Structures are given as structure tokens and as C-alpha cells.
Amino acid sequence: MRRVNLGEAGSTVIPSLRYRDAAAAIEWLAKAFGFEKRLVVPGENGTIRHSQLVSGTGMIMVGSEREGEPAAGGGLYVVVDDVAAHHDRALEAGATIVISLANQEDRGLFYSCRDPEGRLWNFGEYNPWG
């Protein structure tokens, strides 16, 4: 199992937002709030697969809404050291798993769940800082 170097992270709690027009949202967030584009990964048909926008020592991740994935405006992304153990603990505590524990293409082990009030939480070993 790959371990995450949490010492390299600017913050281990990173808001993740989904937009219908993520490219326009990124431009607006930069203009209106002063976010700087650290990384923008284009997707198909003008979508944004993934982006990292920074402000000081903080970061948000922005991407296009994707069919079949929970959007709900986005949620929080939290970098964790042992994703499988974290997943099991959340499941045992009653979290509703939305995206099952799995390795993603280039981002490693990941899962998404909803808390008892329906808020979306994403946990993974992908460290966008490092």
C-alpha cells in the first residue's frame, strides 16, 4: 500500500467543487477571488477533468460535473494515510458509500461517502500538493 507524505501537504482538507461550466468557473474564481491556477487538466468536449487552484497556503479542486458521479455542488476532499482502514471505519460508523473504494487512474486509492445529513466527503491518498 502506498503511503502519503502528509508533511508535504499544505493542507489535508481540500474543498472539491463541481460546476456545469468548470472552465468559466475557474476563470471567474481567479478574477473575482484571486485564485491562481496551479494545475488544469482538460477533459473531453471542453470539460475540466481536474484542476487545482491556490490562494496562499490553501487549495480548492474544481472539475466539471460528471454523469454518474455525485455532484451536489462538490464536497470536501481529505488526504488520508491509510485509505482502506479509513473506508472501513467510515462504513462501520454508518457512512453511505457513494463511490466504492478503488484505485483511480492516476490518483491512487479513493472513495466517496455521505455523512448522516447527506453531505459529500471524498477521501484518498492523492496529494495534490506533492
Image (spheres, rainbow, N blue to C red):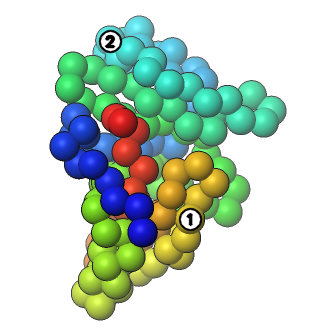
The part of the image, by quadrant, that contains residue 38 is top left
- Tell me the kind of residue under disc 2: Gly
Callout 1 crowding tier (Cα within 10 Å): few <14, some 14–19, many ≥20 = few
Question: Which residue is at the far right?
Answer: 45
- Location of mark 1 (residue): 103
Residue 112 seen by the camera = no
Q: Secondary structure at mark 1?
A: strand
Along the line of sight, the residue nearer the viewer: 60 or 117? 60
The one nearer the camera, 120 or 39, is: 39
**Rendered location of residue 99, percent (x, y):** 53, 70
* Amino acid residing under circle 1: Asn
Q: Is residue 15 above or below residue 120?
A: above
Name the image quarter holding the C terminus.
top left
* Mark 1–mark 2 distance (CA, rounded to whole Å): 33 Å
Residue 109: x percent and y percent? 48, 64
Q: Quadrant of residue 88?
A: bottom left
The relative height of residue 90 versus residue 125 in the rendered view (above or below) is below
Q: Is residue 76 left or right of residue 17?
A: left
Q: Is residue 20 left or right of residue 116?
A: right
Mark 2, residue position: 34
Q: Which is in the foreground here, disc 1 or disc 2? A: 1
Of label 1 and label 2, which has the lower sequence position? 2
Location of residue 34 (image quadrant) = top left
Q: Is residue 12 above or below residue 111?
A: above
- Residue 32 showing in the rendered view: yes
Q: Could you say whether the residue bearing mark 2 is in a helix, strand or loop? A: loop
Task: Check the picture and name the quadrant holding the N terminus.
Answer: bottom left
Q: Residue 39 appears at what percent x and percent y?
A: 50, 25
| Residue at point 36%, 69% (across, down) | 83
Q: Residues within 10 Å of mark 2 (few under 14, many from 20)?
A: some
